[in-house]
Amino acid sequence: MTTGRLFGIGLGPGDPELITLKALRHLQAAQVIAYPTAKAGHGNALKTASPHLSPSQTLLPLVYPVTAGPEADQPDYLDRMYRFYDETSTQLAELMDGGQDIALLCAGDPFVYGSFMYWYKRLNERYQTVIIPGISSIFAGPIAAGTPWVSRNDTLTVIPGTLPEADIVSRLEQGDAIAIIKLGRTFKKVRQALAKSGRLAQAVYVERATMTNQNVQAVKDVTPGNVPYFSMIFVPGSEVG
Amino acid sequence: MTTGRLFGIGLGPGDPELITLKALRHLQAAQVIAYPTAKAGHGNALKTASPHLSPSQTLLPLVYPVTAGPEADQPDYLDRMYRFYDETSTQLAELMDGGQDIALLCAGDPFVYGSFMYWYKRLNERYQTVIIPGISSIFAGPIAAGTPWVSRNDTLTVIPGTLPEADIVSRLEQGDAIAIIKLGRTFKKVRQALAKSGRLAQAVYVERATMTNQNVQAVKDVTPGNVPYFSMIFVPGSEVG
């Protein structure tokens, strides 16, 4: 019996039509479809992949013990997450030892702020691993807004909203084109940092880019209480001539 | 007669299988395939799209009057480029006025260091425009190398190698995960900046990611004279636990 392989499949920003031909091919060939998900819900990755799957494929949810949010501040957060990656890696390894190929779904791109890297680290040396890049949702925001973003000699800086306010301000001041991610409860701090750095007026908020309920607004018009974790802010770089 | 539309089609990093289903659909439906190219050669974008095109589609090369390289330092560089975008926009407009849909090919992603933004700016208000995101070649590099890149609270900074050395050094010192693009004749300066910032040992060089002649090396082992413009360097962010 041949040992199964691990496919890390970048699914892109959400629209099922924005997966690549290569992702589709490997997605449809795998016996097992593994996908990370919060306790409640089925995960964005599965939603994107669903239209391309067949009933003969086995679905394997990998349920996070903790979700991004207040729980992530608790002292045992990392321990619990690492234990989760260890245990689910054992589960995936057993399936591959049994000869099954696994497609592990990754929202966006596998190596850009993705959980896939933790499984990859635990399994890559023992199993044949194929990684398929995907369009990060970070990149889908400016296109959804129709606003040219990064050109010529601009730098591009992606800033997690979880950083301290002063760090966000200095990166906004030094950078050209900007994306800010991990919003939700960090939104008020981020908006303040945009104001302090003089970049609030140009900042654009994009929620669920490329999904059916996509929403684009000027950051200054956004109601802070309504910002989900899966949203982003971008600031265009130098003007396109 | 219905006026034609403009489709800005992100084609991804080079492997024809890394285009999205949406890009494929619009690529195959357009009457005219327009693509930027240097005087010599046919352009990377056309090479990626070619396997998906049919003989009934009209090919329209948009030939840059100047290419990145020493010519870009001349004082009339910008004027010549803007005149080129103006003239070719007129050409594209005439085809759309004649009812033809145009697929304008974009290597990587249309809004990330792409020529498309210049045509978009000139045509967007007069013609219906649809933009399809693509995987930037910047993102394909770490995956080609199999090295996890950006995680947790890392910032991600993309730095053009055309910036002054001191600017590159300070961004390398302040950033976590890094990509450096626009190499070629800037390579020696970039390698020096990596050494000065203490990040040379971790830096990885990737040439033509996802293409058949892909090449991955430690930056310290690269021969400076052999570095093409379409290559990139990345430095991983914090270690994945």
Image: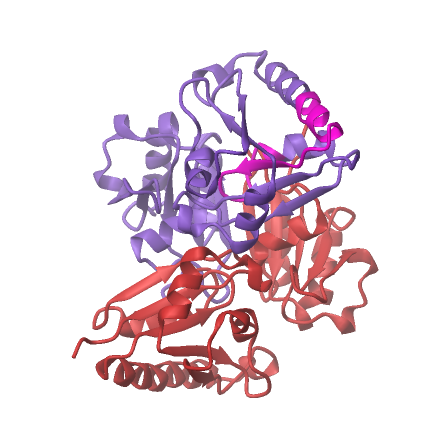
Chain colours: A purple, B red
Please indicate whether residue A91 sits to the left or right of residue A105 in the image: right
Residue A154 in view? yes
Give the residues drawn in magenta, as a range: A89-116
Q: Is residue A102 magenta?
A: yes
Q: Residue at x 52, y 49 (%)?
A: A24
Position of residue B3 measured from the top left corner of the image (x, y, whole percent): 20, 76
Position of residue A162 measured from the top left corner of the image (x, y, whole percent): 47, 29
Say above or below: B40 vs A159.
Answer: below
Position of residue A187 measured from the top left corner of the image (x, y, whole percent): 35, 31
Please indicate whether residue A120 sits to the left or right of residue B56 in the image: right
Q: Quadrant of residue A14?
A: top left
Position of residue A75 measured from the top left corner of the image (x, y, whole percent): 57, 12
Please indicate whether residue A149 sits to the left or right of residue B45 in the image: left
Q: Residue at x 43, y 44 (%)?
A: A13
Residue B133 in view? no
Q: Is residue B42 magenta?
A: no
Q: Residue at x 52, y 60 (%)?
A: B12
Say above or below: B220 vs A98.
Answer: below
Front-most of residues B222 and B93:
B93
Front-most of residues B169 and B40:
B40
Q: Residue at x 69, y 27 (%)?
A: A95
Say above or below: A73 vs A134.
Answer: above
Please indicate whether residue A85 sits to the left or right of residue B220 in the image: left
